[in-house]
Amino acid sequence: MSPARRGCEGAVKPLADADDDIEDLLDAPDEGGAADTAGERRLQTRLDGDLAGQRLDKALAILFDDLSRARLQALMAEERVFRLDSGGRPQAVTNGSAKAQAGDYLVVEPPPAPAIPQPEAIPLSVLYEDAHLIVVDKPAGMAVHPAPGSETGTLVNALLHHCGDSLSGVGGVARPGIVHRLDKETSGVMVAAKSDAAHRGLSALFATHDIDRMYVALVRGAPHPSSGTIETRLGRSPHDRKKMAVLKSGGREAVTHYRVERTFGGDRPLAARVSCRLETGRTHQIRVHMASKGSPCLGDPVYGAGAPAAPVKAVLAETGFSRQALHAALLGFVHPVTGETLRFETPLPPDMAAVQAGLEAL
């Protein structure tokens, strides 16, 4: 064993609880909006001894046995290699030829690239389409793009069949045309880009929050007060990295404007219909914000801690409802190419409408 390796043996390990700052650096727009981290590999090591002062890519290749210098250089170009400062905060390192500094280093390797999605003849509810974009009413149960566990039957597969080769390539091979997302079990209005100009324009509108987005949620109890603005920091839960959570520090700003439209079950509501307008679009934003008010979406398997009142539970059982009761009801924006003001609104899908009818009978 070389002197350089002797002091580092056993130091390379999976990182179980990465700093939330890294989530921010790797985050991307969604519901609507962050990059999946499932399947990532995170490795951390300490660089010291004889390796300090060598080329950084060469030194890290010695420490990370299964990562070549070429692979490390590619990861640096994608800003996925970090040096942790004295406070544990990540600083991206991008120059592999620079002299290695002693300290802790973290490599975040993305999951293996999915296979190129194939066109599938899946019916689409098309609300609008022109040469530049397409607006659809996505059903619950349809993932937006291929991912582990949902490799086929996605909106991307359907769009590839419907639009042929006209989808924008800006989103990459695996996500052509996709500029925002809805959770798999959230239904409602989505827009996809068919031209690169529309893709860039729509992405800019989402980035500057110049999109009118309204969701309808059926929730447990009723949030108090009956209308208001929820403004928090959202990021990965420190207790469960698969969940998002309201954080005291770190994360990203998340703003939801909500209004209780009606309540069900008497003076002390057992459930409510709430409209939520997004000012920002973070992953699971509405679901987390409603849960933070003590009124999670009915049927939410992730954030719906605690059972609803018995009459509400009976309605869910009678209707067979088993997803989060959340529907993207409205999407409005200025067409990025033509300048036309567009607005699309859809009613509750049959499963949520059945739950609402049952609640109205309480």
Image: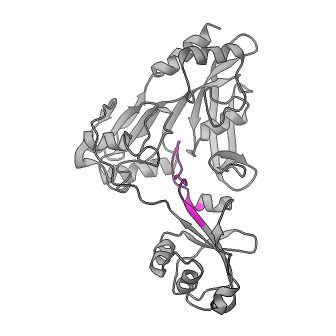
Q: Nearer the viewer, residue 288 or 47?
A: 47
Which of the 4 image quadrants contains residue 291?
A: top right
**How did the renderer colour the structure?**
one colour
Let me know if residue 121 is in the magenta part: no
Answer above or below: position of 348 versus 138: above
Residue 45 spot, x, y in % from top left: 66, 75
Q: Position of residue 79 (x, y in %)?
A: 53, 70
- Residue 105 sits in which quadrant? bottom right
Of the pair 359 and 39, the residue shown nearer to us: 39
State the image quarter where residue 314 is shown.
top right
**Location of residue 95 with respect to 41 vertically, above or below:** below
The picture places residue 81, in percent across and down from the top left corner, at 57, 72
In this rendering, would 258 be left or right of 269?
left
Question: Which residue ends up furthest to the front in the rendered image?
Answer: 1
Q: Is residue 181 left or right of residue 122?
A: right
User: Residue 62 appears at what percent x and percent y?
Assistant: 57, 83
Could you say which is closer to the camera, residue 28 or residue 14? 14
| Res 263 visible | no
**Which quarter of the figure is the C terminus placed in?**
top right
Assign the N terminus to one quadrant of the image: bottom right
Q: Main secondary structure of the magenta part?
A: loop
Res. 340 visible in picture: yes
Q: Is residue 39 covered in magenta?
A: yes
In the rendered structure, which segment of residues is drawn in magenta? 25-42
Name the residue rendered at 50%, 34% in the picture: 185
Residue drawn at x 71%, y 32% is 305
Q: In the rendered picture of this protein, how many numbered marks are placed on residues?
A: 0
Query: Does 73 appear above or below 266?
Result: below
